[in-house]
Image (tube, rainbow, N blue to C red):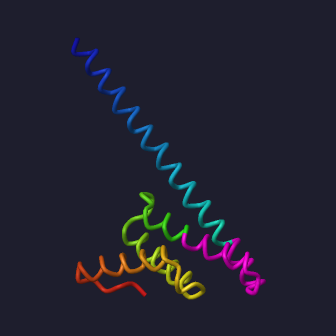
């Protein structure tokens, strides 16, 4: 009986670890895809900044990459929040009224202020 319980426990722990690793790999892939889309969109925007469709794609990709970075379990807080803040600021330079970027930027800055920490530049 004890061996059965021990074997079952080991199986559950092993499957939980496998599930966690699978989720982490999925999160890493999502982060990499968001970064790749951001990189392509930025390059297209730099080549043709007057094209409104390309401009919108760049802003959307930048904000999306910022949000995925901010919520990513793959990145540490010391990585994710400064990266997200940088991306939101980048989007706001092009589209100062972008609500998602503006709200998330303010949220991150207020968190730093509430912890009496300097806001990353």
Q: Is residue 89 above or below residue 76?
A: below
The residue that appears at 73% across and 76% down in the rendered structure is 54
**Residue 75: x and y, percent?**
44, 63
Task: Locate residue 46: give its quadrant.
Answer: bottom right
Q: From which residue to which does the magenta span run?
A: 40-63
For the residue pair 102 and 39, the one nearer the viewer reads as: 102
Residue 43 lies in the magenta stretch: yes
- Say left or right for 49 vs 38: right
Task: Locate residue 48: give its quadrant.
Answer: bottom right
For the residue pair 62 and 120, the one nearer the viewer reads as: 62
Residue 90 lies in the magenta stretch: no
The residue that appears at 32% across and 21% down in the rendered structure is 8
Q: Magenta residues: mostly which secondary structure?
A: helix
**Residue 68: x and y, percent?**
50, 63
The residue that appears at 60% across and 71% down in the rendered structure is 60
Total numbered labels placed on residues in the image = 0
- Say left or right for 44 vs 21: right
**Residue 112: x and y, percent?**
30, 79
Q: Is residue 74 above or below residue 107?
A: above
Quadrant of the drawing holding the N terminus: top left
């Amino acid at each position: 009986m004890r061996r059965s319980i021990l074997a079952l426990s080991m199986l559950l722990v092993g499957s939980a670890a496998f599930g966690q690793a699978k989720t982490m790999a999925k999160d890493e892939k999502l982060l990499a895809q968001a970064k790749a889309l951001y990189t392509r969109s930025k390059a297209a925007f730099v080549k043709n900044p007057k094209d409104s469709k390309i401009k919108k794609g760049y802003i959307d990709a930048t904000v999306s990459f910022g949000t995925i970075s901010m919520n990513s379990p793959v990145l540490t807080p010391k990585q994710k929040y400064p990266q997200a803040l940088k991306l939101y600021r980048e989007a706001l330079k092009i589209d100062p009224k972008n609500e998602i970027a503006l709200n998330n930027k303010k949220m991150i800055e207020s968190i730093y202020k509430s912890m009496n920490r300097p806001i990353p530049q």
